[in-house]
Amino acid sequence: MKPDTRGKASPPPAPAAEATPEGLWPEGLIEVGHVLDAWGTRGWIKVAPDAAEPAALLKAPVWWLRSPSAAGAVRHLELPRRLARRHAQSVVALLDGIAERDQAEALKGWSIHLRREDFPPPAGDEFYWVDLIGCEVSNREGVPLGRVVGLLASGAQSVLRLRRPESEAPEQAAERLIPFVDAYIVSVELDARRIVADWQPDYD
């Protein structure tokens, strides 16, 4: 951001790309990170991925960006990805329509969204968090434990956040936490939207 001749900071220019109405965005877009700042002088941006493995950001041909709601009227941009690569724990990228540093700076704080079909296939027995949301969880005996509403990153492992079944005692906490590790997860059937866990309702 450069000061003008009167000594007051001029707002960064809007990105060159045309804003896309939110209603024209594809359904089911998934938030995968946000813009930290400009990177370099030629329109590159530096991105903080939401996941430790940013493969989807590196592969997706188009990124959808949403401005922070605190900045006033929310804007949406649909920008083809030209280049993207890892940079330490972040990702740096060059998007069509963003050619100057000031334009890249104007995207600071914007969230980045991708289509699920642009995610690369997970390796081995790995799963994308978004695919686990909404799965019903029960234990080996078939006792319902809740529905997955989110996940938490806790050190070296992830933790399932479950909304407890309505049949459980109302004085209990609204959520149940189960580590998503082999010691507790017996099976995951994404097609059936079902997870079996080695867990008892009274463990928590």
Image (cartoon, grey):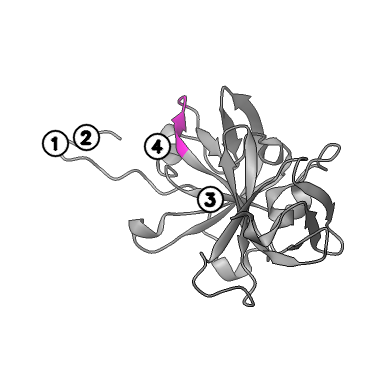
In the figure, residue 115 lies in which quadrant?
Answer: bottom right
Q: Amino acid at mark 2?
A: Pro
Depth check: 47 or 144 in front?
A: 144
Cβ atoms at labels 4 and 3 below 8 Å apart = no
Spatial CA span between label 2 and label 4? 12 Å
**In what element is the residue under mark 2?**
loop
Q: Nearer the viewer, residue 152 or 169?
A: 169
Which amino acid type is marked by label 4? Answer: Asp
Extreme residue in the bottom direction: 167
Q: Secondary structure beneath disc 4?
A: helix
- Tell me the kind of residue under disc 3: Ala
Instruction: Identify the mark nearer the N-term, 4 or 3.
Output: 3
The Cα–Cα distance between marks 3 and 2, rounded to whole angstroms, is: 24 Å
Query: Residue 71: horizontal and vertical position, in percent?
Result: 34, 56
Residue that carries the numbered disc 4 in the rendered image: 102
**Snapshot quadrant of residue 51:** top right
Dot 1 and dot 2 residues touching (CB under 8 Å):
yes
User: In what quadrant of the picture does the N terminus appear?
Assistant: top left
Residue bearing the label numbered 1: 7
Magenta stretch mostly in which secondary structure?
A: strand
Say left or right for 70 vs 154: left
Query: Alpha-carbon distance for marks 3 and 1?
Result: 29 Å
Range shown magenta: 36-41
Residue beneath the point at 72% across and 44% down: 61
**CB within 8 Å, label 3 to label 1:** no
Marks 1/2: CA–CA distance: 6 Å
Residue at 39 percent across and 37 percent down: it is: 102
Q: Which residue is mark 2?
A: 3
Question: Which residue lies under the disc numbered 3?
Answer: 17
Q: CA distance from mark 4 to mark 3?
A: 13 Å
The answer to whether residue 50 is visible is no
